[in-house]
Image (cartoon, grey):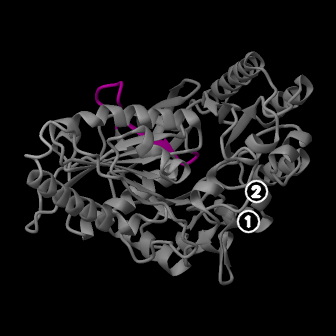
Amino acid sequence: MKSLPTVPTDTFVTKQDSTTGQDALGKPRVYLETYGCQMNVSDSELMEGILRDAGYGTADDPAHADVILVNTCAVRERAEERVFGRIGELTQYKHANPGVIIGVTGCMAEHLREGIPARAKAVDIVVGPDAYRNLPALIDGHIDRASLSRRASQSRRASLSGRPSRQQRASLDVRLDKAENYIGLDPVRRDSSTGWVTIMRGCDRFCTFCIVPYTRGREKCVPPDEILRQVRGLAEIGYREVTLLGQTVNSYRYDGTDFADLLRRVAAVDGIDRIRFTSPHPAEFTEKVIAAMAETPEVCPYVHLPVQSGDDEMLRRMRRDYTVDEYRMIVENLRSAIPGVALSTDIIVGFCGETEEQFERTYQLMKEMRYDFAFMFMYSAREGTVAARSLPDDVSEEDKGRRLRAIIDQQEAISEDVFKAQVGTVVDVLIEGPAKKTDEHSYGRAADFKAVVVRGEFARNTIVRTRIHRSTAHTLFGDPI
């Protein structure tokens, strides 16, 4: 799907930020780039931990790396095309040093499989989301095979002089494993203001437009004790905020512990001041979860609640498992139980068969809900999904674009009003780092997830009480108290 989200973006591009040399065993150095959602960021930290424990070093520049890994997203075709473009750029390092290994991991690896090395000849390994434990073995195996291949090539060089060598086949591990939850592994925690904790993997909902159940498999919940172990570890190294991750995070259930219970247990960990979670599904937003949020001060007053459409027939075609009125009731209950709760959402326009009247219902629902911000997308068929197989993509690109622009314009105006209402208030800002566009200012987020630029330079992971004096449709600006 093509997207034009309002801020904050739901897509991360991250790189490693430290360089270490090879260890005593001569293990390679790895450079890792991440594309996609928060789950991919968490998975990259996991992969770094697995490789670290296997003795690998890290590189902050692909020019200094022996192994280059690109962790990928498959939600939208444009994301995959972006990754192929990046692989083309990274191929220069393989040309300079034929021993460099290039690998593709994550959802795109699962979705396209053999198609990746067929299209990107420089790719040596392809690893799906359930096979990260095997990364060291795959890399070592590829190094060993490459070494054998070079020796064999040298031995027959005289008789084959002038003949190009055959490219070594890429190594693939893209199996989906119903049991793999990476229990007991410790990720490498990067300099983020929030600690990512994956509480469940996969998805059972099979929305007709979504590829995720096919790239990440069925739902698998992590045991509560393992989640709490990770949260305690984050608190011990100075994190004050954790974000619980899952494709439908509020459907979490494990041996009698549900998502509401988990929120309360995580909040009891000493040192954790803020708890966030993403992304919940409206059909799983129970009264018990809302009560846990309202009664647990550590749970931030912010919910990303995807609606996708304001029309019941569209929701049925999407297999969303709720009606517009049921969604309204959830929002009413949230706003009643948690005064001032901030809301964001996902919207798809131009889904299969959407009429002007159905689009207008979405437009009006957004006007009624007054989201703080929204992620808005123009539908395009995703190969492998139910919609691509069985529903005609019959809304014109012109109509899709016009509808997308209409809801973006409306949401921008709403966001500007919502952010402006914060001027004069006092908020606690968790600092993420220096502001990018303003010298001697810091950047962070309020509890309701609004971006805030604070005058002054403050250390990451500190909370600064701030009085807001200015706003845009995307950012608040304030002075420390």
Badge 2: how crowded within 10 Å, few (<14), some, or many (20+)?
A: some
Image point 33% across, 54% down: which residue? Answer: 190
Q: Mark 2 and 1 residues: CB-CB less than 8 Å, in contact? A: yes
Which amino acid, by three-letter code, is at mark 1? Ala
Disc number placed over residue 197 in the picture, else none: none
**Residue found farthest to the front:** 159
**Depicted 346 relative to depicted 125: above or below:** above
Judging by the rendered image, the residue that carries numbered circle 2 is 337
Q: Percent from the top left, x then y, of residue 374?
A: 66, 35
Left or right of residue 454: residue 174 = right
Q: How far from the left and from the top, in percent, is residue 347?
A: 72, 36
Does the magenta run of residues contain 303?
no
Sequence order check: which comes first, mark 2 or mark 1? 1
Look at the image and give the residue range highlighted in magenta.
434-448
Observer able to see residue 301: no
Can you tell which mark lies on residue 291?
Answer: 1
Q: How many residues crowd around disc 1 within 10 Å: few (fewer than 14), some, or many (20 or more)? A: some
Q: Amino acid at mark 2?
A: Ala
Image quarter of the C terminus? top left
Q: Taking 116 as reference, is 338 above or below it?
A: below
Rendering coords of residue 368 (x, y %): 83, 33
| Residue plotted at (78% across, 31% down) | 393
